[in-house]
């Protein structure tokens, strides 16, 4: 299961309803346009995983291994609130957070009008997470806030099931963990971050993470206290934005800390993860990551959450298989 500091799980806190039935197909024109806008990542071999001195071995970040992938397409950015709103208008979809009636919001970001909607109790080991009635993608900080003020920000409060529904509607899919890491590395070999090994090259911020003393003081030196617009900072060499920090990103794989360790065909050629599991992989870290407690904004870092969980710092980007012409 996930580290509650990084991504609190909703498992056991709410009854899991059946996923919403939707018309899972955008128009042919919109699907084709969405695929044309994706980045093509060439097939080939890359070194996956890490053995950084500040890594979390218990997360299964290693071993560093040679993985071969077929070519694939991936979005340059995480899915935005505006894009998700188009999906909801087209399909009638309701997210898990909307149907449960609440989601997790970081305590300092709860909208003033929603403070009376905070549920009793806190998350074990992470009291900065508050369960807020009415918090969902439409109201990211709880009632009183609106996605329309954050239209170019990553959609959050989306579960893995919600992300998968959007991807299917758009004619895409969620990336495998291996695809995500290859794309996030931008062609660099063994680097800690998508741009290299230094967190602040030439003193410049390259990602949206926590500055200051977590969780009491965030100085916002990188320009943001919460999530940033999806094209903030410079893209990596493949053209992907914000693969370190900002929001965690769902992958298609079931979570395991050991499945990938053995050298066998299914773990080294287009690996898709274990066949079953209880939690799904999330990658990339978020605006709440800080070196003092959760430096999982390194490109090899990984954690997980249950497929029905939603928070104010988890989003996703989509992948797809290239057509013969691409």
Image (cartoon, rainbow, N blue to C red):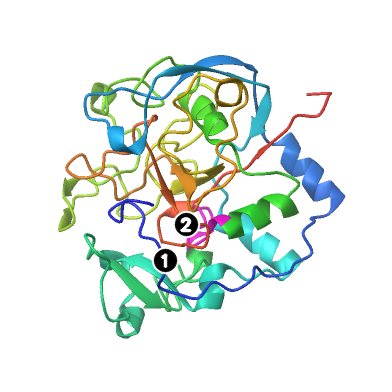
Q: Does the magenta stretch include residue 151?
A: yes
**Residue 130 visible in the current orientation:** yes
Q: Which mark is residue 180?
A: none
Q: Is residue 238 shown above or below 148? A: above
Which residue shows up at 60% across the image and 38% down it? 175
Callout 1 crowding tier (Cα within 10 Å): few <14, some 14–19, many ≥20? many
**Residue in the image at 81% along x and 29% along y:** 323
Which SS does the magenta portion mostly show? Answer: loop
Q: Position of residue 217 (x, y in %)?
A: 15, 55
Which residue sits at x=19%, y=50%? 219
Read off the residue under disc 2. 306
> Label 1's element?
loop
Distance between mark 2 and mark 1 Cα atoms? 7 Å
N-term-proximal mark, 2 vs 1 = 1
**Foreground residue among 10 and 108:** 10
Confirm or deny contact between disc 2 and disc 1 (CB under 8 A): yes
Q: In which quarter of the image is the C terminus?
A: top right
**Which residue is drawn at the image coordinates 43% and 14% (left, top)?**
189
Query: Is 307 displayed left or right of 114 in the figure?
Result: right
Which of these two is toward me, 173 or 237?
Answer: 173
- Percent position (x, y) of residue 176? 58, 36
Residue 192 rendering spot, x and y as whole percentages: 33, 24
Residue 82 visible from this viewpoint:
no
Residue 149 covered by magenta stretch: no
Q: In this view, does 64 lie to the left or right of 54?
A: right
Position in image of residue 14 (x %, y %)? 45, 75
Over which residues does the magenta segment extend? Answer: 150-160
Q: How crowded is mark 2: few (under 14 residues within 10 Å), some or many (20 or more)?
A: many
What kind of element bears circle 2? loop
**Pick the front one: 220 or 121:** 121
Q: Up-down: is 147 above or below 206?
A: below
Q: Circle 1 sits on which residue?
A: 10
């Amino acid at each position: 299961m996930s580290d509650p500091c990084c991504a609190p799980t909703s498992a056991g806190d709410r009854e899991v309803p059946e996923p919403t039935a939707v018309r899972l197909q955008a128009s042919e024109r919109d699907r084709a346009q969405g695929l044309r806008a994706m980045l093509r990542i060439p097939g080939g071999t890359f070194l996956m995983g890490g053995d950084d001195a500040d890594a979390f071995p218990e997360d299964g970040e290693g071993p560093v291994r040679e993985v071969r992938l077929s070519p694939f397409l991936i979005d340059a950015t995480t899915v935005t609130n505006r894009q998700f709103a188009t999906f909801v208008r087209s399909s009638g979809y309701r997210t898990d957070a909307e149907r449960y009636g609440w989601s997790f919001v970081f305590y300092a970001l709860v909208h003033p009008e929603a403070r009376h909607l905070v549920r009793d109790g806190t998350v074990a080991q992470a009291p900065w997470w508050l369960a807020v009635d009415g918090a969902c993608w439409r109201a990211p900080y709880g009632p009183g806030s609106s996605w329309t003020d954050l239209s170019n920000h990553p959609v959050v409060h989306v579960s893995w099931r919600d992300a998968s529904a959007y991807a299917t509607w758009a004619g895409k899919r969620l990336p495998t963990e291996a695809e995500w890491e290859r794309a996030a590395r931008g062609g660099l070999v063994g680097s800690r971050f998508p741009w290299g090994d230094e967190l602040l090259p030439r003193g410049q911020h390259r990602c949206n993470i926590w500055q200051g003393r977590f969780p009491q003081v965030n100085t916002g030196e990188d320009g943001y206290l919460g999530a940033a617009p999806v094209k903030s900072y410079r893209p990596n060499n493949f053209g992907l934005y914000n693969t370190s920090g900002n929001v965690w990103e769902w992958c298609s794989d079931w979570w395991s800390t050991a499945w990938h360790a053995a050298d066998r065909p299914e773990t080294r050629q287009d690996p898709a993860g274990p066949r079953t599991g209880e939690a799904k992989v999330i990658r990339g870290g978020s605006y709440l990551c800080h070196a003092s407690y959760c430096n999982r904004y390194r490109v090899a870092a990984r954690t997980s959450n249950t497929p029905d969980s939603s928070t104010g710092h988890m989003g996703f980007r989509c992948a797809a298989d290239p057509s013969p012409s691409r």
